[in-house]
Amino acid sequence: LTNKGRLPCKYKVNLCDQLALYVIVLGCYHHHMFHFVGKILCHLEPCDAVDVDQAVKAAKLAFGHWSKMSGMERARIMIKAAHIIESRREEIAQMEVIDNGKSITEARLDVDSARLCIEYYAGLANTLAGQHVQLPGGSFAYTRREPLGVCAGIGAWNYPFQIAAWKSAPALACGNSMVFKPSPLTPVTAVMLAEIYAEAGAPESLFSVVQGGQETGSLLCHHPDVAKVSFTGSVPTGRKIMEMASKGVKPVTLELGGKSPLLIFQDSDLENAVRGALMANFLSQGQVCSNGTRVFVHENILPQFLEEVVKRTQRIEIGDPLLDNTRMGALVSQPHLDKVLSFVDQGATVLCGGEPFVPTDPKLRGGYYMTPCVLGECKDEMTCVREEIFGPVMSVLSFETEEEVLQRANDTTMGLAAGVFTRDVKRAHRVVENLKAGSCFINNYNITPVEVPFGGFKMSGIGRENGQVTIEYYSQLKTVFVEMGDVDSLF
Ligand SMILES: NC(=O)C1=CN([C@@H]2O[C@H](COP(=O)(O)OP(=O)(O)OC[C@H]3O[C@@H](n4cnc5c(N)ncnc54)[C@H](O)[C@@H]3O)[C@@H](O)[C@H]2O)C=CC1
């Protein structure tokens, strides 16, 4: 704790030591060595101005070495990091469960996504190239794709390890270094990622972690040596990040919230539509930015859909997130659980769930559990339909026509994701063309392969993560003019 998790290569601890040292809020579970849950176990000291400055300076030094290495050399280290993640998969996943409260099954998939992202960008690291342009008289110009410098990453608590990887992988592939600040609610696994990069042979402090909340985050955004800020979190904080970055005219990537629509047409394969709706709402206890929480179902299939969705929602196994058969763990904190529960009784019909859940296992009783909820007879103007709940609460609305549902689906200030279920291929493409959202799914929902860009329209964000295009958000273009003749001076 004394080094505040800032220089992760300086210490080595085993899993149990880490549990003792770093876990702050156990929303979900206690390991055999603890006897309470939902209890603050220890506090991490937030990094202050001196610490942040030191971290940025160290990252600047690392940038000097890293940016001069060839893409091939960078790729080799990143691939090594991916291998280490693979070999420590279970350990990282368990730590993520303890840190965040999500089920171990999901945590394993998050670790896989992090690894795949690092592998993917390792593959792109040596493809960065420019253009050669011929000019009159044998002169020419060329472009170079160069890194930005020290990038700041600021993460949310819902996918702590995965967010740290999704931000660092493209940043490092382009030759940048990164100082990352995880959410103070989930401070642990980003530190493990820093250890892993160091172990893989990255220059010291190429990826380092500063701990703390908004003060530390704002110190990072304002630091003159930070070239770019990549943020995942809520819209109000995203707006502040952009404001702070604007002082230094720094580019930002913002992955913000959503209130995404899922459209289920009469001709859908109902079984898949139901599965899609569950995937759109209940991953990570519903704490997912891209969740399709406004489920519009054609009126003719509404009764069958509701019957099936409610039945399966009631069957979701809630409880000890470290057990393989658990599908829903604990929410991230008591205030967040209270906030989510407050959305339940706001006029819609509660078809199932929406109540605090007390596991039978006495050692889990202090955790922040709730039963997943389906709300029926929702209306467009209801609070549960308008605001991001960020919990396991699905709002179901009925519709009649394609035109009507499109208009209603787009009637939001957000535009992160959207989905459509239909067997009609023309309708599917026509509908996605008209949906105002950055990530659209046809006949599926909430899959995030790292090969494709992910990000939002409207107030859901700026820039993209994943996919080839993200290289552009972590690099800049330099144009070089080369004169082969004499200077044609006007003076
Ligand atoms: N769409 C998404 O992916 C997410 C949405 N949320 C939503 O946001 C709500 C609040 O959750 P929070 O974790 O408090 O989200 P937040 O957006 O306030 O925090 C996200 C990150 O930004 C940092 N931060 C906060 N204020 C900052 C500032 N002024 N300058 C620099 N960094 C700052 C936080 O420490 C954290 O690391 C949730 O209840 C949920 O509705 C939260 C997490 C992710």
Image (cartoon, rainbow, N blue to C red):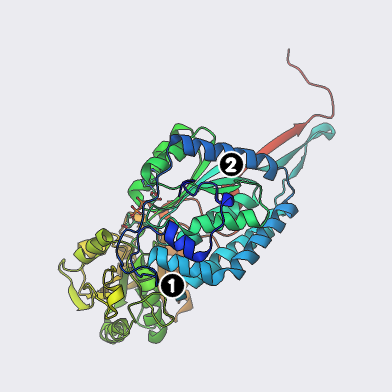
Q: Quadrant of residue 177?
A: top right
Helix, strand or loop for disc 1: loop
Disc marking residue 445? 1
Mark 2 Cα-neighbour bin, 10 Å: few <14, some 14–19, many ≥20: many
- Residue name at image x 26 percent, y 75 percent: 371
Front residue (pair 225, 439): 225
The location of residue 167, given as percent across then percent down, is: 53, 54
Task: Name the front one of labels 2 and 1.
Answer: 2
Above or below, 211 relative to 348: above
Percent from the top left, x then y, of residue 373?
26, 75
Q: Position of residue 205 (x, y in %)?
A: 59, 46
Q: Amino acid at mark 1?
A: Tyr
Q: Quadrant of the C terminus?
A: top right
Q: Residue at x 55, y 70 (%)?
A: 89
In the figure, 461 relative to 445: above or below?
above
Residue extending farthest to the top is: 491
Disc 2 element: helix
Residue named by callout 2: 59
Residue at image position (51%, 32%) is 224
| Left or right of 421, for residue 125 | right
